[in-house]
Image (tube, rainbow, N blue to C red):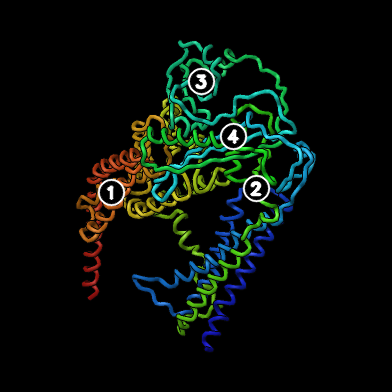
Amino acid sequence: MNQFFTKLKLIFVPFVAVTVLFITTYTFLNWFIFVKLSLFVVDDVFTEIAGPGVIALVIILLWMKPRLKLLNMVSNRRSDPLSFALLITYIGMLGPCIIAQTYMETATGKLTVLDHISSLNHLPLTKYYEVNHFHTDKRFARFKVTFKVSGKHNNNFDMGIYAVSPVLDTAFAQPDTTGKMLNPKGNFKNPFVLLNGKPITGQQLKKIDPDKVETVNVLHGNAAISIYGDRGKNGVLLISLKKQYKVEDILAEITDPPVPASITPPVAWLTTSYSKTISNRLSDSEKQAEYKVFADESQRDFDAKNLNEFVYLERLGPSSMRDNYIAAVRTKDSLTRAYPVILSPVNEPFAARNGNKLFWVFAILGICCVILLMIIAYWPLNVDAEPVSQKPADPFGFKIIRDLVVPRQGFFSTAIIIDLNLLLFIIMVCSGLGFINFNTHDLLIWGGNFRPSVQNGQYWRLLTNMFLHGGIMHVLFNMYGLLFVGIFLEPLLGTGKYTVLYLLTGIIASIASIWWHPATVSVGASGAIFGMYGVFLALLTTNLFPPEFKKPFLLNTAVFVGYNLLAGLSGGIDNAAHIGGLLSGLLFGYALYPSLKQKARQAEAEQETVQMLDELAGKDQG
């Protein structure tokens, strides 16, 4: 019993104390900095998930791991009790903190009563609104269509329609033609036209001299919508001018004088959204058919919905959802402010806005505390454990992180490539483009590989797409694969050859991708990584390595490559780039084998000479 109370004092009490302190402190700072003072705007994913997740992980590694090691936990192949205990403490700290942030946001949100919606312009922005006189006009609605892949193996295809309708003081009698959702009929009427990357109207298209045009590429259906959103609903024309003509001069010739705007922009926009997930293994034509059904159903629901019926309105803060609604607002030329007010209707009493959030804060913490108590009661104290006050050798795992990202001899280029990929991902996240997934259009803007763009002279995309990734899991899995092969190949090839091969196989993979896919945005380092695995596989099939090294690594590498190629057959993965990189890597690997073998023989001869001299020196001394 005395030992149990000792374990409570050393492990359980510190966990509860630090967890409560962490949740209350973080929640207060989040409220004070981002809600009360509004010092700067940050996406909700950072303040509600990423921030607590990183800080809680650091606390667990620094504070709890040394204490849990005081228990004499026995690990084997089937179980790892220490890792399980760390996971429980991490969930117990992170889960309540995430829920506490959403509770804080709803609980502290102020309800402002407006007589007319136009009064919103004259008052400080608040979280919630109740409007006495207003009109939501669906005739002026605008829409944003999104497509993205999700799931562990990119096996889900997510479709979304984000609708915004202007909230006005009174109803306008003037009709509008924008209140229809994007449902491509395949007739390619009124396409979205790009002249050297610059959007132009149908009237401007008619004024272009055909003799000045070099190429015309056509996109339609799902490919056009996935890249250009609702602008591609009727297809896309990609027009390239001949090199002697400048796009600015042509635009000046075909552009009419601007018409002065006379319509007052809406004060706010009311949201409506629809979503559906289908299998990503479907063909493009099947996806197109599924989207048509989805769009028709959504249109019927939208037409029947009374947008003026709600209890109160919630103003959306920075988030990917709000970004989609803002994109919907900007689908038409508008005088709307840079960041329009986006309001979401709520059909429940204002007093019920917090739901059961506070209950789940204590419930999750309580469940994790009970499990931790069971762990403490089961495992005895380790009498040989170091005192908990002693500073751990590497509490944060800094040494592991340093070894992965800091360049050093034999691991110079690999570390820099990993750093560049992670840095670019962090920059895109900090730019508010997403975290779990990025939008296809954003990836194209940042340098994604796309055949029509490359054909228009943007050859740099063959290189830049190698450093872009579609989301957090994409970049982490690719960097793990690069780390594994880079540890072996870079010391063997040398930093110079390794870097050249990585870039060269990556570019070849990009060329294979645009050769196979006529209108697909491709990103990721996997083409170059498959190229390096191709080099490694080629060398493993020679006698460059000793048999005890060659056999296990040849099997593991072949299984890894084969599994990923098979996974690519399910859809959503650029297998063309993978195969292009792999085949080019195999060819380069076999081409390099003679010189590497000769170098290995020279090294063996030098080593034998050194051993012989050491033996002779030993005899002379004798």
Q: Nearer the viewer, residue 190 or 5?
A: 190
> Nearer the N terminus, badge 2 or badge 3?
3
> Nearer the N terminus, badge 4 or badge 1?
4
Read off the residue under disc 2.
347
Q: Let me know if residue 551 appears in the view.
A: yes
Q: Residue at 47%, 18% (x, y): give it.
A: 241
Q: Quadrant of the C terminus?
A: bottom left
Read off the residue under disc 4.
328
Helix, strand or loop at label 1? It is helix
Which residue type carries mark 4? Ala
Would you place residue 134 above or below residue 2 in this image?
Answer: above
Q: Nearer the viewer, mark 1 or mark 2?
A: 2
Q: Nearer the viewer, mark 2 or mark 4?
A: 2
Q: Which of the labelled discs sits on residue 562, or is there none?
A: 1
Residue 543, given in percent of the width and then of the height, sits at 19, 52
Q: Nearer the viewer, residue 72 or 592?
A: 72
